[in-house]
Amino acid sequence: MTDQLPTPDRQPAAESVRFDQYVTYEDDDGTVVCDRSNPAAWIRATELVPCRR
């Protein structure tokens, strides 16, 4: 049995990412971003910068 690692041709399309999967809220002087499907996965930031593609 071999480990099944994702390869570029098997990775899900970017459209499959659900933006409602994440929630943000204010906490003291920063913003917390949390993954709704995995509450242990979160990040806290004091400054948010828009993502540019």
Image (spheres, rainbow, N blue to C red):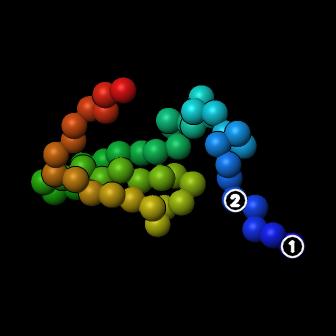
Q: Which residue is mark 1?
A: 1
At x 33% / y 58%, what residue is drawn?
Answer: 43
Crowding around mark 2 (Cα neighbors within 10 Å: few <14, some 14 to 19, many 20+) is few
**At which x and y percent is residue 18?**
56, 36
Nearer the observer, 41 or 14: 14
Identify which amino acid the numbered label 2 is placed on: Leu
Crowding around mark 1 (Cα neighbors within 10 Å: few <14, some 14 to 19, many 20+) is few
What is the quadrant of the C terminus in the image?
A: top left
Tell me the tag on residue 13.
none
**At which x and y percent is residue 27?**
22, 55
Instruction: Classify residue 23 by image quadrant.
Output: top left
At x 57% / y 54%, what residue is drawn?
Answer: 37
Tally the marks.
2
Secondary structure at badge 2 equals loop
**At which x and y percent is residue 15?**
59, 29
| Marks 1/2: CA–CA distance | 12 Å
Nearer the observer, 1 or 38: 1
Instruction: Classify residue 12 by image quadrant.
Output: top right
Judge left or right: residue 48 versus residue 43.
Answer: left
At x 67% / y 49%, what residue is drawn?
Answer: 7
Q: Which residue is mark 2?
A: 5
10 vs 28: above or below: above
Judge left or right: residue 39 versus residue 29.
Answer: right
At x 21% / y 41%, what residue is drawn?
Answer: 48
What is the quadrant of the N terminus in the image?
A: bottom right
Identify which amino acid the numbered label 1 is placed on: Met
Q: Residue furthest bottom?
A: 1
19 vs 46: above or below: above
